[in-house]
Image: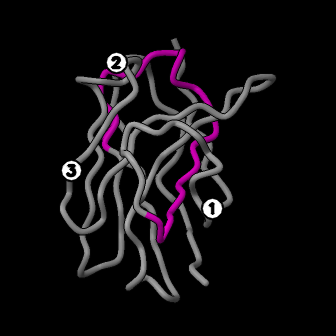
Amino acid sequence: QVQVVESGGGLVQAGGSLRLSCGLSGRTVNINRMGWFRQAPGKERDFVASISWSGGTSYYADSVKGRFTISRDNAKNTGYLQMNSLTSLDTAVYYCAASPRIFALSSSDPGRYDYWGQGTQVTVSS
């Protein structure tokens, strides 16, 4: 079992930046994929970005490409989502997810991920 805890959300003005963190604990040696998703009120949970836990290769949704950067620090068992040039459209609860399975980083299916955090709220004021 793997525990996932996000942090770093908050209120930021449009054009600003935030960095989210995702700490993993438990059987982290088995993790192969980490992903970030977000869910705005009344909407489905959308894919944001994913990363290969071992190799560091990443993939982004078109809506965040060029503005967000996903990374990880294996030694700290922590992943990150650096978010720049934020707009009101980025307002959502952001979820971190992890999986021991190997699948295409371009997969946007939340069902691919086995372990989820509780979410952290990001609010962008215009």
100 magenta-colored: yes
Comparing labels 2 and 3, the label whose residue is closer to the camera: 3
Residue type indicated by callout 2: Gly
Residue 16 relative to residue 87: left or right: left
Residue type indicated by callout 1: Trp
Mark 2 is surrounded, within 10 Å at the Cα level, by few (under 14), some (14 to 19) or many (20 or more) other residues, namely some
- Compared to 102, does 20 lie above or below? above
Q: Position of residue 85 (x, y in %)?
A: 31, 21
Mark 3 is surrounded, within 10 Å at the Cα level, by few (under 14), some (14 to 19) or many (20 or more) other residues, namely few
SS label for mark 3: loop
| N-terminal-most mark, 3 or 1 | 3
> Residue at horizontal 45%, vertical 63%?
22
Residue under circle 3? Answer: 57
Comparing labels 1 and 2, the label whose residue is closer to the camera: 1
Q: Most extreme residue toward the top, as rendered?
A: 126
Residue under circle 1? Answer: 116
Comparing labels 3 and 1, the label whose residue is closer to the camera: 3
| N-terminal-most mark, 2 or 3 | 2
Image quadrant where residue 16 sits: top left
> Residue at horizontal 36%, vertical 69%?
78
Mark pair 2, 3: CA separation? 27 Å
SS label for mark 2: loop
Q: Which residues are magenta?
A: 82-101
Residue under circle 2? Answer: 15
3 magenta-colored: no
Residue 69 relative to residue 110: left or right: left
Mark pair 3, 1: CA separation? 21 Å
Residue type indicated by callout 3: Thr
> Residue at horizontal 29%, vertical 24%?
65
Image quadrant where residue 125 sits: top right
